[in-house]
Amino acid sequence: MNHVIFMMQENRSFDSYFGFMTQYRQAHGIPINSADGKIRDLSDPAAQTAGSLNTAAGNPGPILPYHTGSVCTEDLTPDWAEAHHEMNRSNPAVIGPNSPMDGFVQTAKNVSTGLGVLLDTDGHRAMGIFDDTQLNFYYSTASNFAMSDMMFSPIPTRTGSNRLYSHAATSGGLVHADTSKSGQLASKTIWRALDEAGITWKIYISDWGIDNFTFFSFFSDFNTRQSHVVSIDQYFTDVAAGTLPQVALIETGMHTGRDEHPTNNPGAGIPVPVGQAIDVQKGAAWVAQLVNALEFSPSWKDSAFFFAFDEGGGAFDHVPPINVPNPDGIKPKDFSVPKDCFNQACSSFDLNVSGFRVPNFIVSPFAKKNFVSHTPMDYTAILKFIETRFHLQPLNARDASMPDMTEFFDFTNGGPWATPPPKVTQRTDGVCDFSKE
């Protein structure tokens, strides 16, 4: 394998996207190639147990996971305090593998109360699940190729801090990186490690020309490496010409509505018309365009496309977080006090518990067919895979602790998908209607 590409979309949990994965595979005769032939989705009895705990003050009873009728979702929240309450509503200071995962509805209801403009006032939208009639490309691709049902975001908080882990396996202690005023981080990034080893790389920007933003800019390593940040147009040129770098990251379309983020409220609390809400099918169609370009190109034969979401976004997931090592010994340092400390001493918190499970798959000629991994990991495992392939040292304790993801691949005879499956085009006919979410 000579080319590793990775990309993350925004703020969706594993259950919210792949909750019906077992049902889909059974309906289409697709095996589940895992040790136990199972997927931890809504078919898992634990999902119903967690669902039955998701009540909210003033509601008549629990709101169980259900198939949502809208391809748009009103605002949810994944920030530090909210994520902890979603994992453990009655005791948010204590989260980990035994978390009851019982606070999604209450948290979503609190968001509705705070904003005062949402149609969903009881928090039910947090339990809405998409199926293959809405996300046909994701269900088909994850079923054909390899996926994990135990891949987590690295930290139980919002986008910025999680995305920093995709660059450096740490957030430098930031749990609110989007709004932190701490300046650039000195942490070593995967990009510096690649440079030191003479490995080629690029970061492709989906919104090039609108906002050439990359989370790599949060690190001081960025200052002398900006020439590696290029337009997404260059990705399509490189794929078609067989000139991809050895490692690449694709930054999502946050400013063009292609990132799949749950929201009808993208600007400073100002609601926008439904027609301007973010449609998950639009984002999935963008990912399909990127993946299909790779599959049906000269670059296919020796490449892998790692796809995931950056964090759960406040959407229901029934599997508790996993214990992980603090990357570099830096404890959380940008808390909003007292909100983020839950009546505990702020100094008592550490960065040793993951965030939520996220949808994911690996597209490659070498990806095992229909494979499902149950190995616990967060997505710094992708960095571990890059380090393994290109003989690099770990960046810190977090990526060092991860599996190298070689279990997802079969490198014999050109790989199981030397000839890719038929092209799948993402549907865009879903209904964007908050009254149906």
Image (cartoon, rainbow, N blue to C red):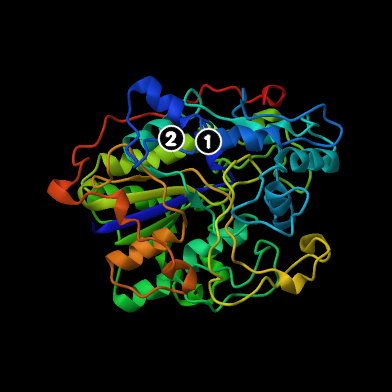
Position of 176 with respect to 164 (left or right) is right
Which amino acid, mark 2?
A: Tyr
Work out whether residue 275 or residue 97 is closer to the camera in this orientation and state it: 97
In the drawing, what numbered circle is on residue 17?
1
Residue 149 placement (x, y as % from top left)? 46, 44
Category of crowding for the residue at label 2, using alpha-carbon neighbours closer than 10 angstroms: few (below 14), some (14–19), many (at least 20):
many
In the drawing, what numbered circle is on residue 342?
none
Q: Quadrant of residue 316?
A: top right
Which amino acid, mark 1?
A: Tyr
Please name the residue shown 40% across and 66% down the image.
228
Compared to residue 280, the image places residue 174 above or below, namely: below
Please name the residue shown 57% across and 69% down the image.
218
Q: How far is the residue under mark 1 from the one under mark 2?
A: 8 Å
Quadrant of the snapshot with the N terminus: bottom left
Under tag 1, what secondary structure? helix
Tag nearer the camera, 1 or 2:
1
Residue 132 placement (x, y as % from top left)? 47, 26
Residue 262 placement (x, y as % from top left)? 64, 40
Please name the residue shown 35% across and 49% down the image.
305
Compared to residue 67, the image places residue 363 above or below, namely: below
Q: Quadrant of residue 435?
A: top right
Work out whether residue 257 or residue 87 is closer to the camera in this orientation and state it: 87
Position of 315 with respect to 403 (left or right) is right
Residue 35 placement (x, y as % from top left)? 34, 42
Give the residue at mark 2: 138
Contact, mark 1 vs mark 2 (Cβ under 8 Å): yes
